Image (spheres, rainbow, N blue to C red):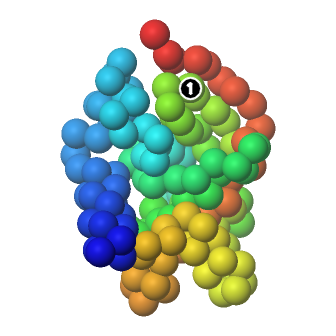
């Protein structure tokens, strides 16, 4: 029974992270409804130099933020890149690094980030991303 609840909870978090309205909700005063597990990450598109923003699930531990990329946006971070994150109404800058060449580290990261669906991440080729927070940019809380 607990396993079923964990799976349903995990799927609802993933569905919430990729809903088209999620960026609007996370930037609003009602962000607390979802911002405990979902944040916005903004990075420069390597091909067009335009800024791109994606809602993602995350886990924060101190000055580190762990993220899973299921849809290929991590390609803009290869080799490391500066990002902006909106986490629980506060904007941070950080240095993001996709973990591409260390399967054990990636697997351990997904086990922490998505304990109920980590195997799905491995099966689908999702990429684990680590972000070191450099600075709190702005507090957007009301």
Where does residue 130 sit, x and y in percent of width and height?
67, 60
Residue at 32% x, 61% y is: 9
Q: Is residue 75 above or below residue 66?
A: below
How many other residues sit within 10 Å of disc 1, few (<14), some (14-19) or many (≥20)?
A: some
Q: Is residue 67 above or below residue 101?
A: above
Where does residue 1 sit, x and y in percent of width and height?
29, 75
> Along the horizontal axis of the image, is 1 left or right of 42?
left
Towards the viewer: 8 or 41: 8
Whether residue 141 is visible: yes
Most extreme residue toward the front is 1
Q: Is residue 25 above or below residue 98?
A: above
Whether residue 106 is visible: no
Residue at 52% x, 53% y is: 58
Where does residue 104 sit, x and y in percent of width and height?
70, 86
Check disc 1 and report the residue beneath it.
90
Residue at 51% x, 71% y is: 115
Where does residue 74 sit, x and y in percent of width and height?
52, 64
């Amino acid at each position: 029974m607990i396993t079923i609840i964990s799976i349903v909870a995990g799927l609802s978090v993933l569905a919430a992270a990729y809903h088209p309205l999620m960026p609007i909700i996370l930037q609003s005063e009602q962000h607390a409804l979802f911002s405990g597990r979902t944040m916005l990450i903004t990075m420069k598109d390597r091909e067009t130099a335009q800024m791109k923003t994606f809602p993602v699930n995350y886990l924060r531990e101190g000055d580190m933020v762990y993220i899973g990329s299921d849809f290929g946006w991590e390609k803009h971070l290869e080799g490391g890149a500066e990002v902006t994150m909106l986490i629980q109404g506060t904007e941070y800058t950080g240095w993001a690094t996709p973990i591409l060449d260390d399967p054990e580290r990636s697997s351990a990261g997904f086990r922490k980030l998505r304990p109920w669906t980590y195997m799905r991440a491995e099966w689908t080729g999702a990429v684990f991303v680590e972000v070191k927070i450099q600075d709190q940019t702005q507090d957007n809380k009301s």
